[in-house]
Image: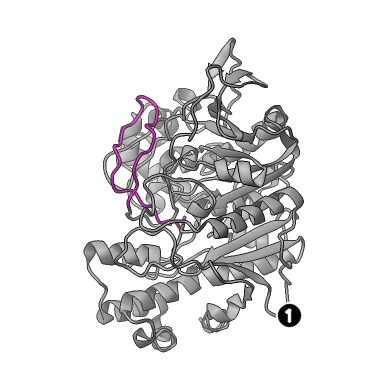
């Protein structure tokens, strides 16, 4: 659930039309941080008669670009509407003729950061971009972020990953918020519908990748923020076994969690996942709020207008249904518990974080609502760490970081993001090759020029994907972008990164640093004070 979304200037709508191209992004807040970035249209004039591919449900026609072909709005499951609302994804009805696949589909119904509800329930579509060169090519399936509450696969244009990396890239939609994670007593699949959609998309990829020049036996599942948390959940899900061969986690892990107030002052302690009982109690409370009697709650809620459901589930806590449920068939135990017990799929993993993750959250608050004071910082520390507050304050003194906000962001980056990811890497490395990185470029694209964003949450995305209207101050360094694309592509092709793997115990693991003009590795445990946080946890 940890995602920070940046959307300022967006025209919301629900249930009508297709998603407009080039929607602009700015910055704003969510509780769990995921970056959503809007894609530009394909940067090439379409051929008079675009390429046609036969999928297992029918023919589709796409567009040809410079060295790639793209097919958008390809259905991988039936519309989850009517009686299919809160059911497992159902098969697509085959079609006759050639289906147009030249424009992205509208995003899944969701609560944007600003404005009224947007999107449509009929949203289970994916986009395929493939090299024009003959295959077979490795396949990368990318799961967007958005706090399990917003975002869209069409927001990420993978043309450079395709043409420079030689990959077939699939970006997907999945149900969000109340439509993806509602739970009710007796409801099959309670709290896991969005994760089920991701698995349905992976099954589609296994069946259809070869038609696009992809290698259906070489599939990497990748995601950022809530997308990375989704990938980690799929690593621990029994029903996802055999659906992918490698995994990439960008800024999110099975172990992500936070104490009271550290994420933001009004955010209670939590994690990206909730027990099934909690989700079902919250679902029952929603039904009562909307006038649905317990004995007919599901049928009654299925009859509610989607806007009414979205309006009743705004916010960032479990009441917004932004935490997938465990204690379910899809997630028998929490992903954290499964990882610690060695029950994750034993496939190669590439995982990492950004150097200054939490500046994305603190920075937006400070530039929109004013800077945090020393008193604010002290209040947060007391709420988050109780008797250990003075100890944390001494370890992250304002004087060392320059401002209370930057000290807060440093402590939160280390406690919420970097150190849990390091533990995740070491646990995964016990059973399968695991490769670690840190994105540390502080001078690339940024949200504004008047704040020291550093390598904030999501700031690596423009180096892998083309995005429009997002992080528009500054430019991507081409050599760094090429290095990252090459590394991601090498891992997707071979299951190995071009640097040494993590060691599960002993000396500090090898973390590859991505920053312009900087080569080599970093001792991430030392850089992010992980021994200190281990001691705080042990003493707590």
On screen, residue 528 above or below 6: below
Q: Is residue 202 visible?
A: yes
Magenta-span inclusion, residue 9: yes
Q: Residue at x 69, y 32 (%)?
A: 209
Residue 262 lies left or right of residue 236; in this view the side is: left
Question: How many neighbours does mark 1 have within 10 angstroms: few (below 14), some (14-19), or many (20 or more)?
Answer: few
Answer whether residue 161 is magenta in the image.
no
Spot occupied by residue 154 in the image (x, y as percentages of width and height)? 48, 37
Q: Which residues are magenta?
A: 1-26
Report the colour scheme. one colour
Judge by depth and name the residue closer to the eye, 148 or 274.
Answer: 148
Q: Is residue 77 above or below residue 347?
A: above
> For the point 44% across and 76% down, which residue is it?
411
Give the percent coordinates (x, y) of residue 441: 49, 66
Residue 486: x and y in percent read 65, 54
Q: Is residue 246 above or below residue 310?
A: below
Q: Main secondary structure of the magenta part?
A: loop
The residue identified by callout 1 is 506
Q: Nearer the viewer, residue 121 or 299?
A: 121
Residue at screen point 47% across, 51% down: 323
Residue lying farthest to the top in this orientation: 97
Residue 228: x and y in percent read 56, 53
Q: Could you say which is closer to the camera, residue 384 or residue 92?
A: 92
Q: Secondary structure at mark 1?
A: loop
The answer to which image quadrant residue 504 occupies is bottom right
Residue 328 or residue 203, whichever sits in front: 203
Figure check: 69 above or below 198:
above
Res 301 → quadrant: top left
Evaluate whether residue 291 shows in this view: no
Farthest residue toward the left? 370
């Amino acid at each position: 659930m940890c995602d920070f979304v940046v959307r300022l200037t967006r025209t919301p709508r629900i249930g009508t039309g297709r998603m407009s191209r080039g929607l602009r992004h700015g910055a704003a807040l969510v509780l769990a941080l995921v970056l959503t970035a809007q894609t530009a249209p394909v940067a090439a004039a379409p051929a008079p008669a675009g390429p046609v591919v036969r999928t297992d449900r029918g023919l589709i026609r796409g567009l040809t670009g410079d060295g790639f072909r793209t097919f958008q709005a390809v259905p991988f499951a039936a519309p989850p509407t009517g009686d299919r609302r809160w059911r497992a994804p159902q098969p697509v009805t085959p079609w006759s003729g050639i289906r147009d696949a030249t424009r992205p589909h509208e995003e899944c119904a969701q609560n944007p950061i600003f404005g009224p509800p947007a999107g449509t329930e009929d949203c289970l579509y994916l986009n395929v971009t493939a090299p024009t060169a003959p295959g077979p090519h490795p396949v990368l399936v990318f799961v967007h972020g958005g706090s399990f509450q917003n975002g869209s696969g069409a927001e990420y244009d993978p043309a450079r990953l395709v043409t420079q990396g030689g990959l077939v890239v699939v970006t997907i939609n999945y149900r969000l918020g109340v439509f993806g994670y509602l739970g009710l007593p007796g409801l099959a699949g309670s709290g896991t519908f969005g994760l089920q959609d991701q698995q349905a998309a992976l099954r589609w990829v296994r069946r259809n990748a070869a038609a696009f020049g992809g290698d259906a036996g070489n599939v990497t599942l990748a995601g950022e923020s809530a997308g990375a948390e989704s990938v980690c959940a799929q690593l621990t899900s029994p029903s996802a076994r055999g659906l992918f061969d490698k995994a990439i986690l960008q800024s999110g892990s099975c172990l992500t969690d936070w104490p009271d107030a550290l994420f933001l002052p009004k955010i209670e302690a939590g994690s990206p996942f909730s027990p099934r009982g909690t989700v079902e109690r919250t679902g029952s409370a929603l039904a009562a709020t909307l006038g649905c009697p317990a004995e007919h709650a599901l049928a009654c809620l299925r009859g509610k207008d989607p806007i009414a459901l979205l309006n009743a589930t705004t916010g960032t806590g479990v009441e917004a249904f932004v935490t997938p449920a465990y204690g379910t068939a899809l997630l028998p135990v929490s992903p954290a518990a499964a990882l610690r017990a060695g029950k994750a799929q034993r496939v190669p993993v590439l995982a990492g974080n950004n150097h200054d993750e939490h500046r994305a959250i603190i920075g937006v608050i400070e530039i929109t609502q004013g800077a945090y004071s020393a008193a604010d910082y002290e209040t947060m520390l007391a709420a988050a760490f109780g008797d250990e507050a003075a100890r944390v304050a001494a370890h992250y003194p304002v004087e060392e970081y320059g401002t209370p906000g930057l000290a807060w962001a440093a402590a939160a980056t280390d406690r919420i993001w970097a150190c849990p990811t390091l533990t995740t890497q070491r646990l995964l490395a016990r059973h399968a090759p695991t490769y670690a990185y840190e994105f540390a470029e502080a001078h690339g694209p940024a949200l504004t020029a008047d704040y020291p964003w550093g390598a904030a949450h999501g700031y690596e995305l423009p180096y892998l994907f083309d995005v429009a209207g997002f992080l528009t101050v500054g430019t991507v360094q081409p050599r760094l972008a090429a290095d990252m694309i090459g590394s991601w592509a090498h891992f997707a092709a071979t299951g190995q990164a071009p640097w040494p793997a993590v060691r599960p115990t002993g000396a500090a693991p090898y973390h590859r640093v991505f920053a312009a003009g900087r080569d080599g590795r970093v001792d991430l445990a030392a850089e992010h004070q992980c021994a200190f946080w281990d001691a705080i946890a042990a003493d707590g």
